[in-house]
Image: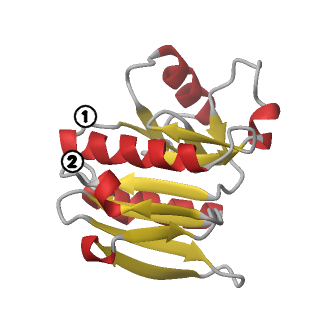
Amino acid sequence: MPVTEATYERLALEDLEGQWEYLCGQIRQKPPMTHEHEDSSWWLAHLLQIQLSRREFQVRHNGSRTHRPTSSYFIPDVIVVPFDYFKATRGTGDLESFADPLPFVAEVWSKSTGGYDVDTKFDEYKKRGDLEIWRLHPYEKSIIAWRRQADGAYSETRYAFSDGEAPVLSLPGVVVRFEEIFE
């Protein structure tokens, strides 16, 4: 039975440990992750935040949601949120979610979510207009970056561990070094 967005938001706020996501009236619990998944996503979040001013950007790890009205609420592994986006929602008691396009969204491949992320989440992130979307693969030690172009289409760039690093083009000057994520 489909649920409304309001019902989903109540569930997500009441069951803080549940890690609930929403797609077209259906709720889904985000499954537990492996050590490799958690290590990669945590280190990515940490490395991004130390390169960014906290007064300009906040990095969230596995907790905040992207929102596409009437369609989806997802919990990406890592997002970068312009600090100004927080001003409208702070102090309201509302679910922390962001409907406006974000400069950076990342998912880390996991055995339990790999297919779902590729088949569902990445398409929703593109429909939202997020500027840069990454898929990290902790076992292959690789990154795929989809970057929004001026015409709204996305280019795809693949990075391997042997490349040494991957730039975050949506956040000028920010670079992610493979050895710091995939140790």
Number of numbered labels in the structure image: 2
Return the x and y of residue 18 as percentages of the image width and height. 38, 24
Does residue 70 show up? no
Q: In 3D space, how far apart are the residues under numbered discs 1 and 2 (Cα atoms)?
A: 8 Å
Density class for disc 2 (Cα within 10 Å; few <14, some 14-19, many ≥20) is few
Query: Which quadrant would the N terminus be assigned to in this image?
Result: top left
Q: Hey, what amino acid is under mark 2?
A: Ser
Upstream in sequence: badge 1 or badge 2: 1
Q: Residue at x 57, y 21 (%)?
A: 10
Which residue position is annotated with label 2?
112
Identify the residue at image location x=68%, y=44%. 53
In the picture shown, does residue 126 fall above or below 112?
below
Q: Are marks 1 and 2 in contact (CB under 8 Å)?
A: yes
From this viewpoint, is residue 10 visible? yes
Q: Position of residue 124 (x, y in %)?
A: 52, 60
Based on the displayed image, in which of its 4 quarters is residue 59 positioned? top right
Within the image, what quadrant is residue 95 found in? top right
What SS does tag 1 mark?
Answer: loop
Q: Provide residue 174's location: percent of width, then percent of height.
A: 57, 61
Q: Which residue is mark 1?
A: 32
**Left-right relation of 119 to 128:** left
Q: In the orientation shown, which residue stands out farthest toward the top?
A: 14
